[in-house]
Structures are given as C-alpha cells and as structure tokens.
Amino acid sequence: MENWEQWENFLKSIAIDYKLTSAEQEFFFRRFERINLEKDDKEICCLVMGDENEEAYKKRKSQVYRKFQTIINHSGKNKFPILLEWLETEYKNRYTQQQNYNTSTEFPQKVSNPFIPLNGIIDNPKFFFNREREINRIFEVLNSGSSIAIIGESGVGKSSMLKAIAQKASQYLKKTRKPIYIDLQNIHSDDDFYAELCEQIGIKISRGRNLKLNIKPYRILLLLDVVENMIYDWFTNKLRSQLRGLANDVDPPLRLVVAASKPLDILFPDSGDQTSPFKNICIEEYLESWNQETIRDFIKSKLQADFLEPEYQGIEFSEDEISDIIKTSDGYPGKVKHQCYELFERKKL
C-alpha cells in the first residue's frame, strides 16, 4: 500500500518551485488532491470555480499546465495523466530518500562501546560530530546559487560530510532538490556514471542531448565523492563537459557538491582548449582536521553518551591518555575514533 501522507506538503513545495499564482494553486491542489484523482473535469470545475462557467475553468487549467510545459512537453490532450505520473514519481523519489535516511538513523538502544562506527562513512546523525560551521557555510553557498567543492586530506571526513549534506538538504535548501550521492571509486566508465545517475534520478539511461532533455524537469543535488578519480582515462572529456553544462546555469538541473583531496585547479588544470569541468562553478570549502578542543569535546560526549550500557558509563580517560590521542591521531577523526575505541575496550577488562 502506497504511503501518501506527505502528498499535500509535497504539492505545496512543487507549487512554490514552479511559481504558481494563488489562483493557479487553487486548481493545482484540487486537481491533484488524492481524493480527486478519479474525478472528471466537470467535477473538478465545480470544486474550483463554483458557479463560474466552464471556459474560465479551462483557461485556469491551461495556465497551470503551461507552467509544467517542460514536463508535459506537448500541446495536445491528456496532460493530466502525464503530469500526475511525474508528480507521483517525484514524490516517491523524495519519500523513499527520506525513508532510507530514517532507516539509516535507527540505532540500538544501548552499546558496550560508544566510539562507533569504526569503518566506512558515517551516515547516522547520532555519530556526526562538530561540523556545524562547515555545514552552515556549505548551505549558504548552495542557497546563493553556486555549487561547492569540499577539499580535505584523506581521512578528514569528506565522505561523511557529503552524507550529512544529503540528509539535511530538505531542511536547509531554500529550493527543493533531490540529493543523489555517487562514489566515483565505484564508477569506472562513462557508461557506469550515466547509468548510476539516471537510475537514481528515475529516468531512462541517456547522455548528451537526450540526458539534457530528460533531466530538465528535475532539480538534483548531485554529491560526487572522490571526484579526483575523474582525471583517469576511463572518464572522457565529454562526460566532464556535460556535467559542467548541466550545472552551469541560473537554475540548473544539477547543483554540485564534490569532495576532493586537492584543490580543483590542481586536479583539473585548464589545458589548451579544455576547460576544467568545475572552473567558476564550485566554491571551495576546506575541511580541516580536529583541533585539541574538538577532540576533547568528542571524547567527553561519547563517554557520557546516553546509548552506552549502564555498566560501562563510569569509564573515564585520563589526561595523559587524551593527550596521547591528540598527539598520535593528528586530529584525523577516523584515527581519533579508532584509538578511543581500543582504549575503551582495554578499560572494560
């Protein structure tokens, strides 16, 4: 059974995105209200226009459908089922995305070691620590109309930052965009990339002009991890150029958030007639390692975590132990966490 409980709020966000007037919104909400989908035009006309004539209703309907001409893409009849299909697909994409994030944040009530998870990307907000300033800055840039590049050394937390941005997009973005995360470590050709992108959007696999047409109705926040892999020979200039084209506009279908280990002008220098794919598109945000204060706050918060089993809640780290972690970890979050985990395990014995 489909879950449409957010349908009304979804329609409101679409109406804002497509700049419907108050009169147009009245038709749009009535026509696409779930309980009205099986009703014919005469019934909808009565709901929307009351005693006004049918011609006024037809004019109102035409005005609304013109706002969605990039989706409907024809001037004939049967516009309603085309727009409804797109709306339901877009709703499911957003709802499924949110459901996935909600599932990923589920967490067992109690654990025996608070310094988890140890491996991989942190995609649970419970474990994401002390990047509020960077997140606020990133969304300021995105809301200003620019794309952004997160630059930082390996192990500093770029991938986890991308996941956090994806999770917070619906809350922080002024204009709704569907977050799509692609790890370029798992993509080894143009074909792989286009297949992954199109499948996540929910459109037919395409490239070039066809992709430009197919993606036009959508607004995507594309998060590319390990973007330095795009320098490899298995990615072509055509792909890099198309990415640039789809992200380089006033209101483009793609807004980019890319993560890289080096500044983009070093990874993708201009060469002859080839322009860097991200030149003048991405503003760079540098992700630094944790300082002493952050490491101390992290350790303190974990030792006092409410999800720690009661029998281990009295464990403490000495000042010498904390100082040693600060010194040997160099402030890399992953190293800090591993060392804290191992120390906590020893103290449990």
Image: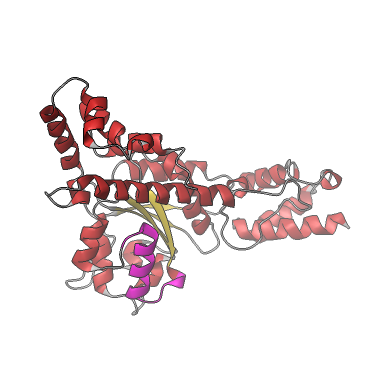
Image height of 93 relative to 7, above or below: below
Numbered label tally:
0
Residue 18 in picture, x, y percent from top left: 24, 39
Is residue 259 found left or right of 334 in the rendered image? left
Percent coordinates x, y for residue 114 in the rendering: 73, 50
Which residue lies at the image location 19% right of the left edge and 37% below the top edge? 64
Which residue is depicted at the point 41% across and 49% down?
92
Render colour scheme: secondary structure
Q: Is residue 34 above or below residue 1?
A: above
Q: Is residue 17 left or right of residue 182?
A: left
Residue 200 is a magenta residue: yes
Q: What's the magenta region?
A: 185-203
The secondary structure that most of the magenta stretch takes on is: helix
The answer to whether residue 99 of the structure is visible from this angle is yes
The quarter of the picture where the C terminus appears is bottom right
Where is residue 129 drawn, in percent x and y?
59, 46
Give whichever of 323, 270 is nearer the camera: 270
Q: Could you tell me which residue is drawn at 22 percent across and 60 percent down? A: 212
Q: In this view, does 99 lie above or below 53?
A: below
Figure quadrant of residue 170: top left
Along the line of sight, the residue nearer the viewer: 309 or 56: 56
Quarter holding residue 271: bottom left
Q: Is residue 186 magenta?
A: yes
Residue at the top extreme of this rendering: 51
Determine whether, in the image, residue 341 is placed left or right of residue 80: right
Camera-nearest residue between 51 and 17 = 51
* Residue 21 can be seen in this image: no
